[in-house]
Every structure is written in C-alpha cells, then in structure tokens.
Amino acid sequence: MILSKTAITALLSATAILSAAPALAQATSPVFAAFATVCAAPAADFSAVRSAADAHGWGETDTKADANMPGVTIADKITRSSTADKTGLVMSAWHGATKTGVKVSDCTVHVAKSDFGPLKDEAAAWLAFTAQETTPKKAIYRFTDTGGAHHALAAGEYDAAAGGAGMQILTVSADANGTVLDLMMIKK
C-alpha cells in the first residue's frame, strides 16, 4: 500500500503531536491538538511557535496580535489562522522582556463558536491536574515542566519556577465568539 502525501503529512503531524506531549493522547479534539501543536508543545517559545505554525500550514491573517502586557516591551509578534475539524482558529503570539530582563512569551488561540467546557476539560487532562482558579467562564492553570511532566505550582513556587524551567500560565476562557486558549511563559 502506498500512502498519499496528505496521508503521510497527517500521520507525521499526529506523531509529532503525540511525541511532543504524551498526555495529549487523552485530548482527542482536533482543536485542542492544534493548540497543543503550535502553542503548548513549544511552551510558547516564540520562534518555536512560528516554526510549528509554518510546519502545520497556519496561514497569514489580518487579525492583529494580542500583544499587550504592562511593563513588557514587545520584541516581535505574529498572527496566523487555520481550521481544525471545520472550526476556525486564529493564533497570535508575541515575546518581549521587562526592564529587569524577565522574558515573557505568549501564544493565544481563539477558537470560533466552541464550547468552553470541553476545552477546559482537555486542558486539565493534558496537564494532569485541575485548574488552580476557576469560574464558570475561565480556568487558570499555573505550572512548570519537570522531567517531561507538568507540575502544578503553588503561589510560593512561582518565582523559583520562573528562575528555572519557566513558569507557564494556561488560561482557558469563554468569550462571545467561542473559547480562548492562552499560554504564557515567564522566565528569569
């Protein structure tokens, strides 16, 4: 049997997603897999996000990047769009630093016409812990990667995580147009 180029590309994409984030195998939606591929697997690292978006066919869009954080000078930003399972996705990413040299990067995927609950549940399954903060329309997960696994952070661990592998903050929130998945990395 000879596989078509499309079948080979799909197989390689699935393999890359599963090998980059073993816990992602539990997250079955193509939407969350798309977010994980461009934002989560690269841990919001700007150049890796750009490379992942390019490698997986995310195209240019006229949407402006959500690049605004008080005290952070933005160095670069991009926006891209794609679809997953007939669902429109718009990704924006940026990176910058504070005056004291703290590096901040962010990768956001806006998911059109999607339900918040299932994406929040997939985020919890991918991380293997529940949100530290939750409301009916928002869930916030703070973590670091230790030994290839996600480690939930308590408030007293934020500074040490930022000084080590980096503190990651995943926010899943509902908005009028769908759901927003936002991953921020803070490193000292």
Image: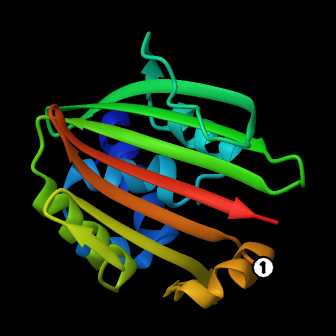
| Residue ID at (52%, 89%) | 154
Task: Please count the marks in the image.
Answer: 1
Please provide percent x and percent y for residue 29: 19, 57
Judge left or right: residue 127 versus residue 42.
left
Judge left or right: residue 180 versus residue 141.
left
| Residue ID at (49%, 55%) | 183
| Residue ID at (62%, 89%) | 156
* Residue 158, placed above or below residue 4: below
Tag 1's secondary structure? loop
| Residue ID at (69%, 80%) | 161
Please provide percent x and percent y for residue 20: 51, 67
Q: Quadrant of the C terminus?
A: bottom right
Residue type at tag 1: Gly
Judge left or right: residue 133 versus residue 104.
left
The local crowd at label 1, few if under 14, some if 14 to 19, many if 20 or more residues have their Cα within 10 Å, is some
Residue at the spot of label 1: 164
Residue at far front of view: 70
Q: Say whether residue 42 is visible.
A: no
